[in-house]
Amino acid sequence: MASFVQFLQQSGVYAAQSFMIVPRGGFNLVCLRDSKDVHLAYDRDRLQVEDVRLDQVERVAQDYIKTRYGEQKSQERDDQLLRLRTALYATAPPEASARGLKVSAKGTGIPQIKATRGNTEIRLDVAILPRKDFKIAFKFLKQLDQTGKVINATKWTPDDVPWFLTRLNWTFGAQTNIFFTSVEASWITVQKALGPKISRDAFRKDIVPFKRRGADLTCFLVGDYDAMANEAAGEYLPDEQVFVVVDQGNPPVFDRGEAFIGVMAHEIGHFLLHKRNLPGSGHHDRSGILLSSGMESLSLDKQLVTDLTAW
């Protein structure tokens, strides 16, 4: 039976929910498995659906990765490009059982792609999302130890920011067409001994005033932080447009490799929901999805994409 599936994880194709996102004025990629004799129908005023041919694989793969990662070089970027090229080459030959589809979009709304073979039809809702851009600053804490010596409170440094942005812009850019640009990455020094775990009061009084004016959001890296029970590894302060993340992240909630960047994405999720003036904490009970009150990952789903963007 024919089915739509993603080429890359967390790439804005939610096959289980028959849903995908396409940037307005841009494109996304989806694989149609078991595609022999399948006829495609769609709103040609808003969508353009093309098979990726062998002679187009390199250009399409490069354009896709560049749009979501920018020009910043990284091992993750190279790995994703290799995965995508390999998958597209597998679907490009005319005799292949699967088809690589390039879906371009214009206009607004959620048009459908219908794939029909005989009396069997499957559908894929396509949300056309405008691009949103936010400016983010990263501040890294130095404080005094008990002897009055200035020490780094966090293991992270401004040199890590390109990696932060690589992960964040894939998580939100590829899945919601929301991107972040760093406007500052610098150390701040508080001339006090705040202790190994920063209290919430000290954070507001002594650290938040260092936020970057003019940035949409400021992230503080402080080492360890005494967060609320329901925000065990970070916290977003909507009245200040800042958030804090602990060095180790939250291993019990995220897979080991996502424990730190997952918490950063979690707090940014709160920021995006706040920008839309949505009520409540933003937490939900859908396990394995960002902002879940249980186990989380960097994956979104149709409901969260809707909440974060509302098209």
Image (spheres, rainbow, N blue to C red):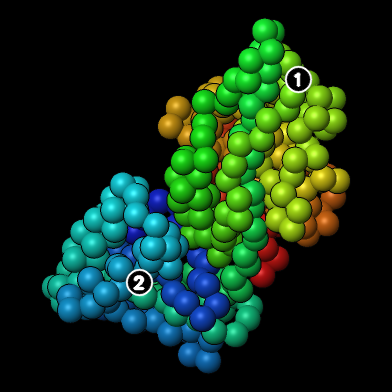
The residue at the point 54 percent across, 84 percent down is 106
Is residue 107 shown to the viewer in this render?
A: yes
Percent position (x, y) of residue 245?
Answer: 64, 32
Picture quadrant of residue 293: top right
Comparing marks 2 and 1, which lies closer to the viewer? Answer: 1
Which of the two residues, 35 or 221, is positioned nearer the viewer here? 221
Tell me the SS state at disc 2: helix
Amino acid at the residue labelled 1: Lys
For the image, the number of numbered tags is: 2
Q: In this view, does 204 lie above or below 198?
A: below
Percent position (x, y) of residue 86?
Answer: 21, 59
Which label sits on residue 217?
A: none
Left-right relation of 126 to 6 = right
Which of the two residues, 213 or 179, is positioned nearer the viewer here? 213
Task: Assess disc 1: are there few (<14), some (14-19) or many (≥20) residues with their C-alpha within 10 Å of its C-alpha.
Answer: some
Q: Is residue 285 above or below residue 93?
A: above
The residue wearing badge 1 is 192
Tell me the SS state at disc 1: loop
The residue wearing badge 2 is 63
Left-right relation of 98 to 48 = left
**Mark 2 vs 1: CB contact within 8 A:** no
Query: In which quadrant is the N terminus drawn?
Result: bottom left
Amino acid at the residue labelled 2: Asp
Percent position (x, y) of residue 174?
Answer: 48, 60
